[in-house]
Image (cartoon, rainbow, N blue to C red):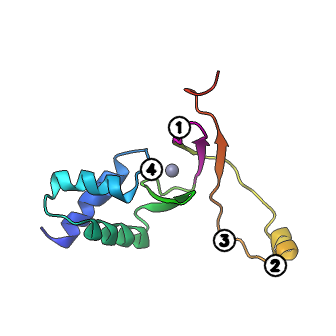
């Protein structure tokens, strides 16, 4: 199978779910379609897709997850089950103030709001 065809399948897998899958999960899904694919190939394709801006990487504590939603958004995270829900939340902040106070130049924001999902609220 051509490299570009493999990459397209992997992109579709990431974009077909809102669960923010890990590379291991994507690998298992990819194997159903490309029987001889290796985990290394999956990682390489994910890296290329990320470089192309076709998917996004998110760091959920120490786990790397992949997001097919490339629009700017944040995540609501349930502290009970760990589910990640995409959320469009305004995150305006005063860039000049951050530069002055912290000597740090912000480029983007990506935050998690921790709480309880509807299954875990009483
Ligand atoms: Zn997301």
Place of residue 80 in the rendered image (x, y in percent of width and height, measured from the top left): 58, 36
Of badges 1 and 3, nearer the viewer stands 1
Secondary structure beneath label 1: loop
Marks 1 and 4 in Cβ contact (< 8 Å): no
Residues at marks 1 and 4, CA–CA distance in whole angstroms:
14 Å
Mark 4 vs ligand 1: CB below 8 Å: yes
Residue 28 located left or right of residue 63: left
Residues at marks 2 and 3, CA–CA distance in whole angstroms:
13 Å
Of badges 1 and 4, nearer the viewer stands 1
| Marking on residue 34 | none
Which residue, as the protein is rendered here, is positioned at the far top?
122
Mark nearer the N terminus (2 vs 1): 1
Is 20 contained in the magenta span?
no
Which quarter of the figure has residue 86? Answer: top right
Question: What residue is disc 3 on?
Answer: 107
Residue 62 located left or right of residue 44: right
Question: What residue is disc 2 on?
Answer: 103
Q: Tell me: residue 94, above or below residue 69.
A: below
Q: Which residues are the magenta region?
A: 73-83
Place of residue 45 in the rendered image (x, y in percent of width and height, measured from the top left): 31, 69
The C terminus - image quarter: top right
Residue drawn at 13 percent across, 58 percent down = 35
Mark nearer the N terminus (2 vs 4): 4
Place of residue 2 in the rendered image (x, y in percent of width and height, measured from the top left): 15, 70
Residue drawn at 23 percent across, 55 percent down = 30
Residues at marks 2 and 4, CA–CA distance in whole angstroms:
33 Å
Which quarter of the figure has residue 52? Answer: bottom left
Place of residue 71 in the rendered image (x, y in percent of width and height, measured from the top left): 52, 55
Question: What residue is disc 4 on?
Answer: 20
| Marking on residue 81 | 1
Residue 2 located left or right of residue 40: left
């Amino acid at each position: 199978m051509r490299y570009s065809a493999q990459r397209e399948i992997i992109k579709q897998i990431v974009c077909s779910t809102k669960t923010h899958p890990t590379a291991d999960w994507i690998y298992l899904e990819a194997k159903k379609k490309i029987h001889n694919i290796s985990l290394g190939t999956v990682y390489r394709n994910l890296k290329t897709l990320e470089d192309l801006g076709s998917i996004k990487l998110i760091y959920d504590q120490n786990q790397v997850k992949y997001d097919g939603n490339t629009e700017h958004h944040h995540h609501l995270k349930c502290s009970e089950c760990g589910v990640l829900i995409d959320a469009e939340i305004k995150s305006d902040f005063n860039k000049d103030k951050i530069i002055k106070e912290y000597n740090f130049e912000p480029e983007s924001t990506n935050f998690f709001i921790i709480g309880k999902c509807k299954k875990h609220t009483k």
